[in-house]
Amino acid sequence: MKKQGFTLIELMVVIVIMGILAAVAVPKLFGMIAKSKASEVGPAAGTYVKLQDAYFSEKNKFGGWDMIGYAAPGGSKGASSESNNFEYNAAEVDTDEATSTGNAIGWKAKNIAKLNDCDSDYHWTIALGAIGSTTTVSSYTSAVDDTECKALTPTFDQIGK
């Protein structure tokens, strides 16, 4: 007569192994989830810089979101937009104005919810600037308010370079 099944010891070993795997994997998983939520910021800022570059090369000045044809994630064209994770706005460059000298924040993203160690209401920004006295070359300075937030988007400071 053959008995089939698992002993209590075998079941306990499996439960302990699953507990160890869960203890190791869950914190890593939450980190990946936060990084994936923050990943929308880089492409959104990159698109803004490309459109601003094209506008600057034609007009020799910076333009607002409507002027350059930019639409942030989660919304339509205009001075602000909101996705599930971030709120975007044109900051100091309104939709109807343009600046030739720059030195104004033209793009800003604020996280709506906490992303791991990055609390809500921190900003990712793109500042506009022009190089030289003739202002024929555009420049961009990207920044993140908090080091914990910067860890979620490690290459953000390379946007516009």
Image: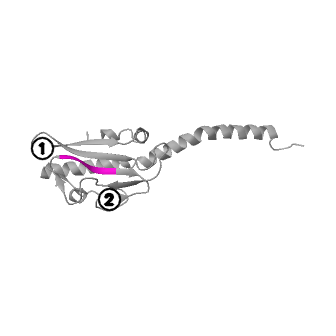
Any mark on residue 80, and which?
Answer: 2
Label tally: 2
Residue 38 % position (x, y): 42, 47
Q: Is residue 7 visible?
A: no
Residue 141 % position (x, y): 26, 41
Q: In the picture provided, is 122 more to the left or to the right than 128?
A: right
Q: CA distance from mark 1 to mark 2?
A: 28 Å
Task: Name which residue lies at 23% across and 51% down.
Answer: 51
> Mark 1 packing: few (<14 Cα in 10 Å), some, or many (20+)?
some
Check disc 1 and report the residue beneath it: 136
* Callout 2 amino acid: Ser
Asked if the residue at tag 2 contacts the one at tag 1, i.e. Cβ–Cβ closer than 8 Å, the answer is no
Residue 18 % position (x, y): 67, 40
> Mark 2 packing: few (<14 Cα in 10 Å), some, or many (20+)?
many
Q: Secondary structure at mark 2?
A: strand
The C terminus sits in image quarter: top left
Task: Name which residue lies at 76% across and 41% down.
Answer: 11
Q: Secondary structure at mark 1?
A: loop
Write the start and end of the magenta stretch as one range. 102-108
Q: In front: 107, or 11?
A: 107
